[in-house]
Image (cartoon, grey):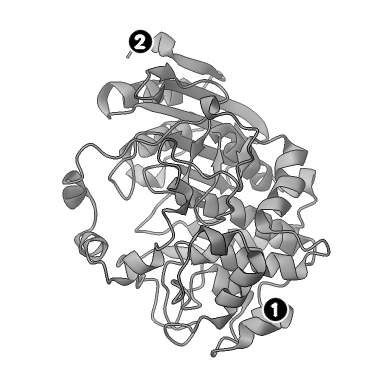
Amino acid sequence: MDDNAVGGFVRPGFEAVQEAFIENFRRRGELGAACCVYYRGEKVVDLWGGIREKSTGEPWKEDTMALVFSTTKGIAGLAMALAHSRGLFSYDERVSTYWPEFGQQGKKEITVRQLLSHQAGLFALDERLDRSLVVDLDRLAAVLARQKPAWEPGTRQAYHGITLGFYESELLRRTDPEHRSLGRFFQEEIADPLGLDFYIRLPEEIPNSRLAPLERPPNMVAMLLTMPLPLVLSAMNPRSRFRRCLLGSELPEEDKEHIYARNLEVPAGGGVGTARAMAHAYGVFATGGRELGLREETLRCLMAPAVPPVHGFRDECMKVEIRFSLGFMKPGPENPFGHPTSFGAPGTGGSFGFADPHAGIGYAYIPNQMGVHLQDPREGALRTAMYRSIGEPDPYHM
């Protein structure tokens, strides 16, 4: 790849990140991508390059956006954290206190913390989930309330791949004085004040020319060699919990020409935006969130270690150990990133965003060539270079 095909800048001292970004195109199969880093409140890395759309060869530009799948969960988590900071709900209060109908089918004692940490046993819906249901928030709320947990809440962890965002949004609608959905709350309370190009519901006025269609992995067989075997076997079984937790994940892809969601709010997997926007948002939270009025108490909650369910962190859907807390993934031996106080979310295909309050870092990476690794080596190379630039080792390669 011609180095001139990479746009953007790095501050002095962060040249290693640019080198790793270029190396991803040369050696790691990158097609188009963007990476951004905020460090102690300053944007120190803002890179983009490669091909936006493979079929036309059009370049990835400064304002190119892409669908980030479950990386959206972290952005949704920021919105929920801000709502908590404003006193709309307590993490340790029962969900049914704010949403009485939620208490049916044995869910009365589920706390907000358990729900946001994938410990409510609500990883899938028995009723059909389609676009007509998602756009009808009242009908969706009734379906969510009727769902029976798969087991006693708080005893096991199961990845709420799609349902998490819908439950979060309804909780927010019940507690917000303006009864806003999660996507609208995020837009008005975080994205607009910070000037972020990120949407949990992509509006019609965003032209197709700004969107990077995602490219499926060229060799799905490679997944068998790179993913944990229990996860691969679960993904291949159409009746598995893993497959059930992702029912509805195709909703953001219903426009087959461009893989993104227009006028459809899927807060657990339908976010579309730039790496710059995600890094900026995480950077604000990593440095205290004063711009948004974030309370110190809320930030301490986000920084705290994940609390395991009774049977530990082994996920009943993913079939691997993974740590979740308050809408985010947390670092652990099985998924190391940043310092222990960090919080963020990865997405299918390789995107990742997180805040590291200990280091004062907000970081994000978005590709359009989907990868096949649980921990993407392209993203790992960038993150390792970033930490090396501030004089610290990254747990990814420790």
In the image: residue 180, left or right of residue 113: right
Q: Amino acid at mark 1?
A: Trp
Using a 10 Å C-alpha cutoff, classify the residue at mark 2 as few (fewer than 14 neighbours), some (14 to 19) or many (20 or more). few
Residue 102 position (above or below residue 55): below
Residue 45 position (above or below residue 393): above
In the image: residue 306, left or right of residue 298: left
Q: Residue at 70%, 78% (x, y): give it.
A: 99
Q: Residue at 58%, 28% (x, y): give it.
A: 207
User: Can residue 346 be spotted in the picture?
Assistant: no
What residue does disc 1 label?
99
Label whose residue precedes the other's in the sequence (2 or 1): 2
Using a 10 Å C-alpha cutoff, classify the residue at mark 1 as few (fewer than 14 neighbours), some (14 to 19) or many (20 or more). some
Examine the image and state in which quarter residue 87 appears: bottom right
Residue 58 is situated, as x and y percent measured from the top left of the image, at: 42, 18
User: Can residue 61 be spotted in the picture?
Assistant: yes
Q: Nearer the viewer, mark 2 or mark 1?
A: 1
Q: Amino acid at mark 2?
A: Asp
Q: Residue at 49%, 53% (x, y): give it.
A: 269
Question: Quick one: which residue is furthest to the front in this view?
Answer: 132
Out of 354 and 152, give the one closest to the viewer: 152
Residue 153 position (above or below residue 53): below
In what quadrant of the picture does the N terminus appear?
top left
Which element type, helix, strand or loop, lies under badge 1? loop
State the mark number for residue 75. none
Residue 33 is situated, as x and y percent measured from the top left of the image, at: 43, 29
Which element type, helix, strand or loop, lies under badge 2? loop
Examine the image and state in which quarter residue 138 appears: bottom right
What residue does disc 2 label?
2
C-beta proximity under 8 Å, tags 2 and 1: no
Residue 158 is situated, as x and y percent measured from the top left of the image, at: 41, 72
Residue 212 is situated, as x and y percent measured from the top left of the image, at: 46, 31
